Amino acid sequence: MSKPILSLRDLHRDYKVGEGRTLTVLNGVDLDIAAGEFVGLVGPSGSGKSSLLHAVGLLEAAPNARLTIDGQDFHSANEEQRTRARLEKIGFVYQFHHLLPEYTALGNVALPQRILGRGASEAEARARELLTTLGLGERLEHQPAQLSGGEQQRVAIARALANNPRLLLADEPTGNLDPDTSKQVFDALKAIVKAQGVGALIATHNLELARHMDRVVRLENGTLVPFTPEHVS
Ligand SMILES: Nc1ncnc2c1ncn2[C@@H]1O[C@H](COP(=O)(O)OP(=O)(O)OP(=O)(O)O)[C@@H](O)[C@H]1O
Ligand SMILES: [Mg+2]
């Protein structure tokens, strides 16, 4: 296997629930993802998929885990270092896209590049290229409310890829789409991951899509186990 994009060891996550009680959701999660590897994450509702993605996506600290992304150690990273890495190294596609309503599709994809200091015309050119690749070349000037659900989700994917991340994380990116659109969005995501050698971890309830991943892991009782979609109904 080529050098891992993601290396995670011994991630734990507890939530406090009520007076002095804790709920252990992640109980020693290990995961490696290589460049260009498209990995599915499955598990029942409440098993901790979003919790895992949030920790790997540096949306929260995971002080006890060992976590390296693209060779950089985030074991004891502070908030500023995590924010920077989220912009430079990680693309995150939320289940409900979180696009900025007042910006156009082009503007939404250009914005994270502008925050990193890229010039306006360069950022727009990159945004145009990504949106066109994702089939939205005729929708560049539309605001999110003027786009269908699948189109909005594709804008969110373009935005996540805008700064050429090394690691792409997606939380049910096709969860609220019809089967055809969901397959389209999935194929677009996979093609870009393969073309750009990005490591990807995609949470999904859709076992049909999971069959098209390079590898699938399943959360069970707080740890990850290999999973073969064909063998389970
Ligand atoms: N902030 C929180 N405080 C307390 N409990 C939490 C918190 N966030 C999540 N949980 C609990 O942790 C468990 C895992 O939640 P998580 O959102 O990671 O699951 P999931 O696998 O993503 O589920 P789904 O498939 O429904 O999206 C759930 O039982 C949830 O109630
Ligand atoms: Mg979830």
Image (spheres, helix red, strand yellow):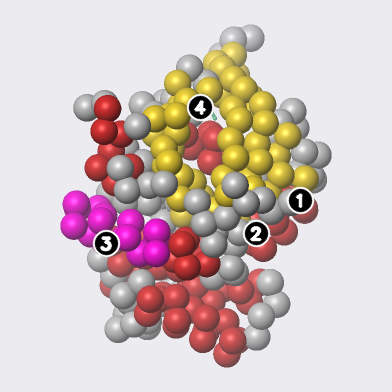
Say which residue label 3 marks. 184
Give the residue drawn at x 71%, y 31%: 65
Q: What distance separates the C-alpha of mark 4 from that of mark 1?
A: 23 Å
Q: What distance separates the C-alpha of mark 4 from that of mark 2?
A: 24 Å
Front tag of 4 and 2? 4
- Asked if disc 1 and disc 2 are in contact, CB closer than 8 Å, the reply is yes
Within 10 Å of disc 4 (Cα), the crowding (few <14, some 14-19, many 20+) is many
Give the residue drawn at x 33%, y 77%: 136
Q: Is residue 125 magenta?
A: no
Specify the quadrant of the image occupied by residue 40.
top left
On screen, residue 51 versus residue 5, left or right, reads left
Within 10 Å of disc 1 (Cα), the crowding (few <14, some 14-19, many 20+) is some
**Residue 89's disc number:** 2
Up/down of 124 relative to 178, above or below: below
Please state the horizontal and vertical placement of residue 56, each as a whole percent of the image: 61, 42
Helix, strand or loop at mark 3: helix
**Residue at the extreme top of the image, as rendered:** 20
Q: Amino acid at mark 4?
A: Leu
Q: Earlier in the sequence, mark 4 or mark 2?
A: 2
Q: Is residue 187 magenta?
A: yes
Give the residue drawn at x 59%, y 14%: 22
Within 10 Å of disc 2 (Cα), the crowding (few <14, some 14-19, many 20+) is many
Q: Which residues are magenta?
A: 177-191
Q: Amino acid at mark 3?
A: Gln
Q: Earlier in the sequence, mark 3 or mark 4?
A: 3
Please state the horizontal and vertical placement of residue 10, each as a whole percent of the image: 66, 26
Q: Earlier in the sequence, mark 3 or mark 1?
A: 1
Q: What distance separates the C-alpha of mark 1 from that of mark 2?
A: 10 Å
Ligand 1 within 8 Å, label 4 CB: no
